[in-house]
Image (cartoon, rainbow, N blue to C red):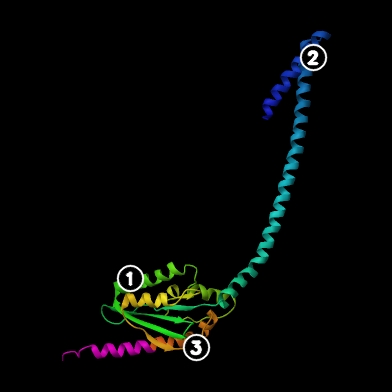
Amino acid sequence: MNIFYFLNSYIFKKKKFIELSVEGKGMNQDNVIQIIFGVIIVGFLSLLAVNQFDMKGIMSKVDTKVDVNEKRLSRIADVLPEVKARVAWEEINSPMTGFVISSKPEKTDENKYRISYTLYDTQNNVLEIYPIELDERQIKIMSYAIAGKVYTTAYNDPTFNEMSIYSCEEKEIVNIPITCNAETSFVIRKNDMRIYSNYIYDLTKKKPYIIKTKQMDTWKDITNNLKTIHDQIEKTKEIQNKKHNKNVPPADN
């Protein structure tokens, strides 16, 4: 209830009561006014006392809730590092069905760029390396298409960049080769790797270089073999360059 409405109602009732009493006792107007003001002040002070008591009770409850929330937040803050470390450990050690490594575009000619896609399948322990040479615009389209295929079929699967962050959380150093595009290279958790090898073949109509390699089941296995994988990719580039040079006619003198 509005405090001013309450006071007005209270004053009106008290005034009527006092006027009736005065008429019966024959008191003058000044005495009536003094009595009215005295009653008003006492009533107002009483009301303030009641409201102050109620406010103290409310503030006490609020303080209690704040203390409880602070304690909860404090407990969450204490637990967060442990949760973060646990998530990092699980990501690093979780099994996978394979991975897709995308290289950064490398200029090979005036208008030509080369990019390679390396797929690994845990079912057969081989690297499938697809060296692709296209013009700049086509290379960008190819990159978007393959990254989009992974995103749409394995939305929650992490990139190499995300996995390297998890490794840092575990105080493990990961040296991703500078030629690797960590943002568009992925660890595939459950999907059949043939989804991606068939997709790349449909886009390029080229068969990959097949290289037998070590068994790799987790991100930790990948990081332990990154240098070997990188060296194999570089060898296919050399083979591709030799084929390219054979097909290029000699320059006129």
Give the magenta-colored segment's residue range: 235-253
> Dividing the image into 4 quarters, which one contains the C terminus?
bottom left
Query: How far apart are labels 2 and 1 at the CA level?
Result: 98 Å
Residue contact between numbered discs 3 and 2, judged by CB atoms under 8 Å = no
**Residue 219 position within the rendered picture, expressed as x and y whole percent measured from the top left:** 53, 79
For the residue pair 252 and 82, the one nearer the viewer reads as 82
In this rendering, the answer to whether 135 lies above or below 27 is below
Q: How crowded is mark 2: few (under 14 residues within 10 Å), some or many (20 or more)?
A: few
Q: Which mark is residue 141?
A: 1
Name the residue: 62% across, 72% down. Answer: 86
Kindly identify the amino acid type of the residue bearing the numbered disc 3.
Lys
Residue 214: image tag: 3
- Main SS, magenta region, reads helix
Q: Which amino acid does label 1 sit on?
A: Ile
User: Residue 175, percent across and down?
Assistant: 50, 82
| Mark 2: amino acid | Asn
Drawn side of residue 66 relative to residue 39, left or right: left
Callout 1 crowding tier (Cα within 10 Å): few <14, some 14–19, many ≥20: few
Q: How far apart are marks 1 and 3 (CA)?
A: 32 Å
| Front position among marks 3 and 2 | 3
Q: Is residue 149 left or right of residue 138?
A: right
N-term mark: 1 or 3: 1
Alpha-carbon span between mark 3 and mark 2? 108 Å
Kindly tell me whether residue 199 is visible in this rendering: yes
Q: Is residue 158 above or below residue 235?
A: above
Viewer-proximal residue among 88 and 28? 88
| Residue beneath disc 2 | 31
> In the shown orientation, is residue 222 left or right of residue 138?
right
Residue at left offset 44%, top offset 69%: 153
Give the number of the mark in front: 2 or 1: 1
